[in-house]
Image: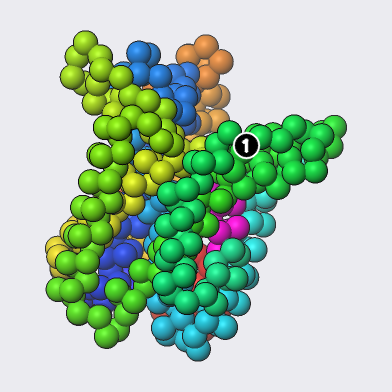
Amino acid sequence: MTSANATPTLLTQRLQSIDALRGLVMLFMLLDHVRETFFLHKQVSDPMAIDTTEPALFVSRTLAHLCAPVFVLLTGLSAWLYGEKHQGRADVAAFLFKRGLFLVVLEFTLVNFAWTFQLPPTVIYLQVIWAIGISMIGLSLLVWLPRAALLALGALIIAGHNLLDGVHFDAGSALHVPWAILHDRGWLEVSEHLRLRTSYPVLPWVGVIAFGYGLGPWFGRASQPAQRQQRLLLAGAGTLLGFVLLRLLNGYGEAPWAAYPNVVQTLMSLFNITKYPPSLLFLALTLGTGLLLLRGFERAGQARWVAALAVLGAAPMFFYLLHLYVLKVLYLAAVAVFGLNQGAYFGFDSIGAVWVGAALLALALYLPTRGFARLKARRRDIAWLKYF
């Protein structure tokens, strides 16, 4: 989106805020993946079990909830900005389709191998890169709708998909596979030796990416910063208010919360929301927070910490693939040196060690990511670089 070493102007500041927000949620993603690598002996459910999850672990996992919704929203927003720079909807649709297909192939190959180190694989997990790829392919068709219709459709999917929670199809049904991909997380038996796990059902994410695309004009060249920031404030605060009101009703689209003997566990219960597939309340909390953060990053202007975060957000796929392989190699090295110290796993003794490990890894990955971001900004003649 932006040059990694450019001096912010009114134009780049508008775009730098997008990269900075993307960079922040990627740090939260890194924290969560360090947890999944070195704290897997204390697994968490979805939603989490309040009675058995320590507050520090709950907070770490909850921060990671921001990652996928914000990233998908920004993908839709960035697609609109791409169209503003190029020849309109036809170019956007073509780019979205090709980029989405690229991400789907990437999930089946480099990403899945980074998680499993199996070749050939016996299990393929269809996770966030898959969901973004399918959402982009879906958006390549939806961009032809009028903006009002696109926003309405996105809002309808986000708000209404929980009405489908009770719909299930057995493995023998013709609708089992498409429904597992769209909304009902489950296993798909491809052969005797290969299974697919639809970890990220894609229907809600199509709603999020459509909504992000519909917000694009707020960030257009002709938009006014003050008006945009006012809109982001109203949209973010209104979405969070909707989360609070719906959560207090303790009904639609989410596991109910309960009062506990202490305030901490009661708050944990209130914010204990479902990600797979993302509930209305999950998306209301994360997207509302994301919109306010986006406003905050733009208002922060030329702050050095914003520019540092924008570096990570300017080369997101490079950072994503790099951190997965580094984590896998580090885990295998730790097992080789120290053995399995947590039952069937090697792991840290505390969630604090997870945070320290994530911070050290972020520092180690910063320079190679900055180098790739600068290459990407400098060599716009290399077409494949824009996919990273």
In the image, which residues are magenta?
128-136
Tell me if residue 4 can be seen.
yes
According to the picture, the residue beneath numbered tag 1 turns out to be: 167
Q: Secondary structure at mark 1?
A: loop
Choose top left, top right, bottom left or bottom right for residue 356. top left
**Image quadrant assignment for residue 73:** bottom left
Mark 1 surroundings: few (<14), some (14-19) or many (≥20) residues within 10 A: few
Image x and y of residue 209, in percent: 47, 61
Left or right, residue 332 beside residue 366: right
Image coords of residue 360 (percent x, y) = 32, 40
The answer to whether residue 112 of the structure is visible from this angle is no
Query: Which amino acid, by three-letter code, is at mark 1?
Result: Val
The residue lying at 22 percent from left, 71 percent from top is 228
Q: Is residue 4 left or right of residue 375?
A: left
Q: In the figure, 106 relative to 384: above or below?
A: above
Q: What residue is rendered at 60% in x and 77% in y?
A: 94
Quadrant location of the N terminus? bottom left
Magenta stretch mostly in which secondary structure?
helix
**Color style of the picture:** rainbow
